[in-house]
Amino acid sequence: MSTTFSAPLDGTVVALADVPDPVFSGEIVGPGVAIIPSGEGDVTVLAPVNGKIIKIHPHAFVILSEGGAGALVHLGLDTVALNGEGFTLHRENKATVSEGDQMITWNPSEIEAGGRNPIVPIIAMEKKKENLRFLVEMGTKVTAGTPILEVD
């Protein structure tokens, strides 16, 4: 059963190889894509799949999809060091969510102004690159909810 991941926020889709963090660019956590956020001000990140929240932190969350794929969404690089400052959670661990549900609100511009990269890796955990089909070309501007990745 395949799972479609939708864009959790507006922005430009880029290859994981373009993420300036070896954990993501080296696909150590898993394969996927990343989104460079667009727009100013507060941005509410949405659930990319239907499923159950396995873990939610202020800067990241993992949803186990109904199809069995784990979807990791990580808001910016090195944002764990912010200890939750600047992030508002809308869901709790173990909650069931539907694609498009509000997950976390943050301000990518403020993250960048603070010296951190606001890029958002979207990872298919415990999958191999050959299990993924990219539904948009790298460099495409997408809006939240646009299907971006299919995972077998």
Image: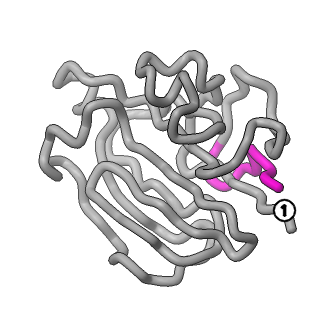
User: Between residues 128 and 107, which one lies in front from this camera angle?
Assistant: 128
Residue plotted at (63% across, 49% down): 124
User: Between residues 108 and 20, which one lies in front from this camera angle?
Assistant: 20
How is the structure coloured here?
A: one colour
The residue that label 1 is drawn on is 2
Q: Is residue 135 among the parts visible in the rendering?
A: no
Left or right position of 37 against 128:
left
Q: Looking at numbered disc 1 in the image, what kind of residue is underneath it?
A: Ser
User: Between residues 1 and 122, which one lies in front from this camera angle?
Assistant: 1
User: Between residues 98 and 57, which one lies in front from this camera angle?
Assistant: 57
Q: Secondary structure at mark 1?
A: loop
Quadrant in which the C terminus is drawn: bottom right
Residue plotted at (65% across, 38% down): 32
Q: Is residue 80 among the parts visible in the rendering?
A: yes
Q: Is residue 146 magenta?
A: yes
| Residue 108 percent across, percent down from the top left | 33, 35
Q: Quadrant of residue 16?
A: top right
Q: Is residue 13 magenta?
A: no
* Position of 146 relative to 34 (above/below): below
* Position of 82 relative to 3 (above/below): above
Left or right position of 83 against 121:
left
Residue plotted at (41% across, 58% down): 61
Q: Which residues are magenta?
A: 143-152
Quadrant in which the N terminus is drawn: bottom right
| Residue 44 percent across, percent down from the top left | 41, 55
* Position of 102 relative to 10 (above/below): below
| Residue 51 percent across, percent down from the top left | 60, 75
Residue plotted at (52% across, 33% down): 28
Left or right position of 47 against 66:
left
